[in-house]
Image (cartoon, helix red, strand yellow):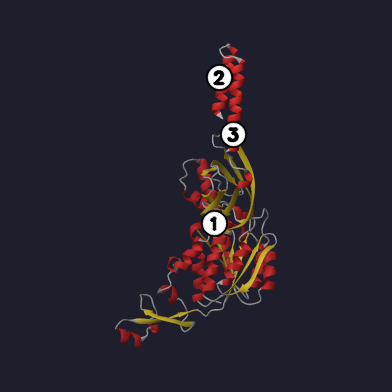
Amino acid sequence: MMAVIVLSLGLVIGTAFREVSWGFVITVNLIVFFVSLGDLLFSPKKKELSFKRFLPSELERGIPYQVELEVSNHSQHACSFRLIDGLPQTFELPFPVSGVAQKESTTMITYDTTALVRGKYEINKLYFRYTSFLGLWEKQTTVELEDSIKVLPDLTETKQYLENAQKFLVYEGLNIRRQRSGVGDFAKIRSYVVGDDPRKINWRQTAKLQEVMTNEYEPEHGKYITILIDCGRMMGAELTKGNRLERALEAALTVTVAALQKGDYVSVLAFSKEIKVFVPPAKGMAHLQTILQAIYHLQVDAAESNYGAVLQYLEMMQKKRSLLLLFSDVRTFLHEESALIFFKRLRQRHLFLMIGIEDQTLIKRTKAEPIDVQAAMLKSIAQQQIVIKKREKIKWEKQGLQLIEAREEKLAIAAVSHYIEIMNQNLL
């Protein structure tokens, strides 16, 4: 195409200086026209091209995946092409992707993409542009390729727990020792470690193996765990990786796996100003998919959470004693005086634990050097906020309501550890 433009400009300049006759110009243009027409005939027709897309039906947020596109050229002519797949704007878009489709052959094109926002998406289009043999013509076609994709929360921590639970907490020794003596089911015999209860030493196995062995007990299975996920405005605060809701979902799914693996019943309730999702309690690892499909699309609402309404709803739906594990913003929750009335009534039947994410900005302010008046004021206000939060937490904890905070990268570990500790102490 650039060659044609340069040739045309040269002919125009030549005629202007009368170096080239008009007859020569017409002859050259006719030659170019027929060559161009011939080039058009040596390019594939649109109906001679077919396409297929291969991609997973479910992706995890923030994890790269590979998409394959199959371009079949059924014509006798090769062509160079560029394509743009119809992915949503919430995906990373590495387009255009270029390639060459040889005659009567199938070409596989791959590209990597990452989904940044959870939800369900429909992909309907593929935009394909290809050039003729000499590149004088370029054709474009829009192909209807329909696919549906679900973008799930990042399950990396959940998989890590399944592969190696030791990364999340120590099952041996001190953690088990806190369990009440004589409570729970016999699990196995293992080597004695420092911190074990000497009363649980298995003397018969010790004499047989010439090594100190101890009996290990595990909590009774079949307890009820109710996971509450706050989707209110404050859960939209951005963190290093995602926002608070993203981290809460990832931690909630990890606790779900831990509970289901131990034979407990798990239910999930997501809320903001109203109830968004409720999954009734069930046990077994198959229940994980039920929960995942129910909550994968949850988004933050631009409204304050109504703790009173959700606790009232929970009181009607959850009749059996259970561990209420709430993922929310601690500072917001502490100022909900109306919720305290409902919790006082709920704690008579249920055990309550709230887990939030530490405000790292606030913590950094308290540790900052007061180099000037403004820095000193910011440090003072931050310290005041910390004191107010501690005072309010003490008030709630006196009512039997435990509240903890963890760093964003440690939220899942903290949630699983506290769940195991509660189960080991047989508090339910």
Residue behind mark 1: 387
Crowdedness near tag 2: few (<14), some (14–19) or many (≥20) residues, C-alpha within 10 Å? few
Specify the amino acid type for callout 2: Gly
Depth-wise, is mark 3 or mark 2 nearer the camera? 3
Residue extending farthest bottom: 204
Tell me: residue 27, above or below residue 274: above
Q: Are marks 3 and 1 in contact (CB under 8 Å)?
A: no
Residue that numbered label 3 is attached to: 38
**Residues packed near mark 1 inside 10 Å, few (<14), some (14 to 19) or many (20 plus):** few
Q: Quick one: SS at disc 3?
A: helix
Given the current orientation, which residue lies at the most extreme top position?
Answer: 18
Front in this rendered view, residue 74 or 13:
74
N-terminal label among 3 and 1: 3
Residues 270 and 68: in front is 68
Sooner in the amino-acid sequence: mark 3 or mark 2: 2
**Vertically, is 340 above or below 240?**
below
What's the CA distance linking mark 1 and mark 2?
81 Å
Type of amino acid under label 1 = Val
230 left or right of 364 in image:
right
Q: In this picture, is 98 found above or below 272?
A: above
Query: Cα distance, mark 3 to mark 1?
Result: 82 Å
Give how far across and how far down residue 253 sits, in percent.
55, 65
Q: What residue is drawn where x is 41% and y is 73%? A: 174
Where does label 2 land, which residue? 10
